[in-house]
């Protein structure tokens, strides 16, 4: 929680860019995992 509060208090643009890139990577990874798992469960359910 302290890290989040530090982020909110920091007005540096570089920190914001880092957080945007990190968040985009996490979201992209989550979508990739959900797509992979979703396809596998559909195949398993059809058999």
Image (cartoon, helix red, strand yellow):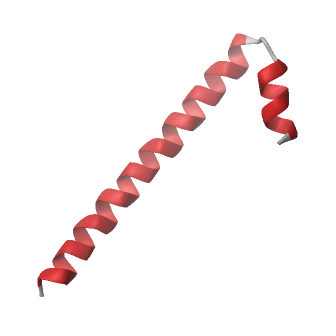
Above-or-below relation of 30 to 5: below
Q: Is 17 located above or below residue 26 in the figure? A: above
Above or below residue 38? Residue 22 is above
- Residue 5: which quarter of the image? top right
Image quadrant in which the N terminus is located: top right
User: Which residue occupies the extreme bottom position in the image?
Assistant: 47
Q: Where residue 30 sits in the image (x, y, percent)?
A: 45, 52
Above or below, 41 relative to 19:
below
In depth, the one of 22 and 42 nearer the eye is 42
Q: Residue at x 45, y 50 (%)?
A: 29
Q: Residue at x 36, y 59 (%)?
A: 34
Quadrant including the C terminus: bottom left
37 on left or right of 25: left
Picture mark count? 0
Left or right relative to 30: residue 34? left
Q: Residue at left 72%, top 21%?
A: 15
- For the residue pair 46 and 19, the one nearer the viewer reads as 46
In the visual, does 34 lie left or right of 22?
A: left
Residue 11 rendering spot, x and y as whole percentages? 78, 11
Q: Which residue does the image show at 18% across and 82% down from the upper left?
A: 45
Q: Which image quadrant for residue 43?
A: bottom left
The x and y percentages for residue 25 are 50, 40
């Amino acid at each position: 929680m302290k890290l989040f509060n530090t982020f909110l208090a920091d007005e540096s643009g570089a920190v914001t860019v880092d957080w945007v890139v990190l968040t985009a990577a996490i979201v992209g990874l989550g979508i990739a995992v959900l797509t992979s798992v979703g396809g596998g469960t559909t195949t398993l359910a059809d058999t």
